[in-house]
Structure formats: C-alpha cells, structure tokens
Image (spheres, coloured by chain):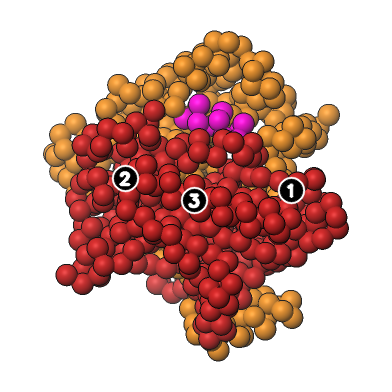
Chain colours: A red, B orange
Amino acid sequence: MTIESERRAFRNQLIEAGILVSTGVDGLYLRSGAFERIVRGVEQYVSRSGSDEAAEQYFFPPITEKASFERTDYIKSFPDLLGVIDIFHGGDEEHAELIFAFERGADWTRDLVSADVVMAPAACHALYPRLTGVLPEGGKRFEVQGYCFRHEPSIDPTRMQSFRMHEFVYVGDPTSAAAYRAKWIDRAEELFTRLALDVEVEEANDPFFGRAGRMLAANQRATALKFEVTCPVSSTQARTAIASANYHESHFGESFDIRTTDGNVAHSACVGFGLERIALALLKEHGLRVDGWPKDVQASLWP
Amino acid sequence: MTIESERRAFRNQLIEAGILVSTGVDGLYLRSGAFERIVRGVEQYVSRSGSDEAAEQYFFPPITEKASFERTDYIKSFPDLLGVIDIFHGGDEEHAELIFAFERGADWTRDLVSADVVMAPAACHALYPRLTGVLPEGGKRFEVQGYCFRHEPSIDPTRMQSFRMHEFVYVGDPTSAAAYRAKWIDRAEELFTRLALDVEVEEANDPFFGRAGRMLAANQRATALKFEVTCPVSSTQARTAIASANYHESHFGESFDIRTTDGNVAHSACVGFGLERIALALLKEHGLRVDGWPKDVQASLWP
C-alpha cells in the first residue's frame, strides 16, 4: 500500500464508523459526539499536566484581527496556508448585482471586501499582540486554545483545514524560554507514552513557502528551534506530528514590542498539542471503539 | 444612560474584570478560562436537558463548504453578515507581488481567490446538506454545536462576530416539526428560569437584508415561524435574544432535497442556544464573580 492509499483507507474507516462525517471538501469534517469526547479528554489531560505552570488560561475564537496578523511574518512565510475573510459592503443596488452574478453562475465574491479579521493561523498568535509593553519579572506563562485554519486540502484525515491547537506558552528571557521548550518536549513525550502511543521526538522545521522559504526552513533546522513529537497515525510508513515545541527567539517580541524588565526584547517559546491529531492517533493505535481501549489509557483521559 | 452607553459600560466591566480580552476589533474577544468554564457549564446543562431526544450529536468546525452554503438563501437574505474565505494560489512570482503590495501598504488581498469553504453562518446549516435523500420513519433528531460567524461589529458584548451556537434540530414531517419547536420553546423558558434569568418568549424575525428583506421579515413574523427567548443582558432598556426556536417549514428540505418516507419534502425546526450570550446573561444577572452566584444556579451548571 502506498502512503496515499493508507491515508485514504484510514479516512474511509473513520467515516464509515461515523466518527468523522465527510463534507465533500478534503480536510473538512463534521465531528461526531464520540470524536469530540476524545478531543475533550485529551484537552483536559494536557491541561492537567500543565497545572504546575499557574498559567493564565485563554480561549481564542477561530478568527483574529487582521492588523495584528499583518505584523507577524505569516504573509511572507506561509502565504499558501492563510485565510482572509471577505465581507459584503453595500446597499440594495450592490446586493442586486451580487445576486445577479450568483444566479448566472459568475464569481459573486468578486466585489466583496476584506474584513478587519482573518482566519486564526495558530492559537498563540492571538496572544502576543496583547503583551506589548514590559513583562513582569520572570516573564509570563499562558495556556491557550483555539481553532486554527490552514488551507492545505488533503485526503489525510490528520491534515484538517480547521483544527484545534492547545498550547502552553512562555514569554520572558531567552534562558527561561529555551528551558521551557526543553521541559515541555520531555513532558509531551511522557504524556503520549502514558497514552501508549509510539512517539518519537524529532528536529523539525515549519513548511516555509517557496524558494526563500527553503532557506528559512534550513536555518530553522540548523539552529534546532523546532521539535516535533511524531507518531504513526494515518500511515505506517510516515509519521505525523501530534505536538510541537518551538523556540521563537525574539520573533514575536520584536513584532509586538514586548520587553523584559531589563529592557531587552522578550523571547518566547510554545508547545502546541494538535487535539484532533492526538484523538486520531489514539483511534488508530487503540481502535475505533473507545470502550475497547486499554483501561489505563481511558483512566488517564477520563479520570 | 442610553442603551449604547449601557452596553459600552458592560463591555468595559467584562474587560476590566479580565473575563473578556479586547482585540481592538468590535465583537472579537479573547475569552478567559473563567468565561469558558461558564460556556461549558451552559453547554452541558443544555445538553442534559435534551437527553430524552436520543439525538445524534455533532460538532462542526467554524468553516463550512461553499457549495452547500450557496444552496441556502443566505446570500439573498443576509449578505451583510456572511464571510467568504480567500486564499493565495500562486508561486514565487505571485508571492513576490503579494509581498510588494503588502510592503507598500496597498491591498495585498486583492489577488487572492475564493476558497471552497466559507465561514459557518449557523450551526445547523452544516447538517442539512448531509441529509439529502429519504429520512427514516419518524424523521431524525440532532444535537449540534459550532462556531458561527456574523459580520456585525458592535460595542455590545452580546453581539460577537464569532460565537458558538448549540442547537437541537428535528427534520421530518410538518406536524412533528411544529410540535418540536413548541416543546423546545417551553423547555428553553424553563431552563432559563431555573438559572434565575428574567426571560420572556417573543415572536421574532430574522434580520433579513435590505428592501426585499423587510417583506421577508414581515412574513416571518406574520406566520409566527420564529420565537426568541429574550433577557436583559447588556442593557436594562433593550432585551437580548439568548435562544431562538425556528420552524423552517420546507426551506432546507427543498434546498437539499430531503424527503420523508411518504415522499413529501421534509420540514425542519431547530432551537438554538447562544452559548456566549447565555454566559453573559448569567454574568450580568448574578455578578462577575461566579462563586457569588446563587448556589442552585451553580449546582445546575456544574452538578
């Protein structure tokens, strides 16, 4: 079996079992109550593991303000993944034109205009714009979650266009940021091992776009800024990242003018758990019927 | 105090208390862990109240497929509220142009193209396209939830651009659909009364757009298709809908060719609970500190 056909087969299994419901768009599924129960179990399991952090907790809507989005490098680095929201601005006359275009099968979206919101590309991106200024002594710790959008239609069920990222984030001095990432790499590995998932920690790089992107990716890998925890999910031949830990250095600190008490630009690090991917990894490893999962895995997720 | 200034004052209170976090965009907030806990309490409370339904449960992503969206009347009825998602399709050269536009402050979104997904306008809309065909005898019952988008920036914190709708839906014969709506109007009123909210049931109409929309609204009201459960939330002078019950007649049945066993077009009805709005109604009525809420209200939400 090719990787592609393994992925398609896993997707078909999930759909036939009623765990995901096809919408006809690759990467977009309705989720059953059973699937959501797993996602919430993972969410709470991850959340409990970070309770020592005394992190401020935030939940983000699936859209974020365009003005802040433009201050990150996302447009440069990941143009192929972004989603901009267009809206209708007009009166009865413009509306009549819109309907006329729609009814004759023309592109009715052409005269829409950009809203002041865009699709959220990553959970923690909504956080940094709120931190402009000077951090308290020792920096700050956060636990955040939100739906993210990535335009990357795929038949691989682990590659959804809309999915939830659950993150722990540190913003403060460079030494603490690097230590934070290191601690969470170990903790994530341990968390997944307790769920009896076959995980490995790998150096990784973000899928930067295009010719210039290849250099950025090489640089990210060379400086070992990003690690992924991977697991075989939809294919036995290719591993899927189910969590990642990223040291951003001063990237967001500079973009949003965040400083530490000593006046330096703040550094940041985050660990992100892909809630849907972890749910899928569990379904793949332990079977499509949750009541057949190992008792200790069930007890970890739903204590 | 004017209604406007009452609303602004309530928003400021919520932001000062750290319950919502401003993003600089009206109607878009980060939500604190405390706020999310209330939302989840309401979600589970509503869910338990419908456990007699034996409803199939689905959770929807915040985006939905464009092809189905185009088969509803949303473009005609609510163009001012919709959100279309644009994406980048191109290579290095087009990317260079995008960045060039962005860096000189021009509209960098102009050459983006429509994706095959749009913002979900209402939770239950993602359901009907899946039901094309003949329903089982007696119709079907669903419990669904998802983030919805409405482009209606407002300083009223109850009018969010991105919010969750939790719905119970019946699809089947007209008599059962009408009875379903009637049952849920009573049940919703009772649910809110138990939370000590000052609710009223009112005939209502959707905010149809423009000149033609005024006729549609008048017709909806005249035929008493939609009811809202209202409550004073951000103003003492104007009530806010925190739930609504809608009998769609054959609207979705026709759009998606859904039929009952007797060969007729299916009718549908839904009741939608606005999770964020109910959370805000509770915060307004019982105070910004949950541990000061009446004990029986707390026990209902977190048994």
Residue B154 rendering spot, x and y as whole percentages: 69, 45
Q: Nearer the viewer, residue B21 or B134?
A: B21
Q: CA distance from mark 1 to mark 3?
A: 21 Å
User: Circle 2 sits on which residue?
Assistant: A196
- Whether residue A115 is visible to the viewer of this picture, yes or no, is no
Q: Is residue A70 magenta?
A: no
User: Circle 3 sits on which residue?
Assistant: A186
Are discs 1 and 3 both within one chain? yes
User: Circle 1 sits on which residue?
Assistant: A139
Please give the label number shown on residue B279: none
- What type is the residue that disc 2 sits on? Ala
Callout 1: chain: A
Callout 3: chain: A
B244 displayed left or right of A28: right
- What type is the residue that disc 3 sits on? Asp
Callout 3 secondary element: helix
Callout 2 secondary element: loop
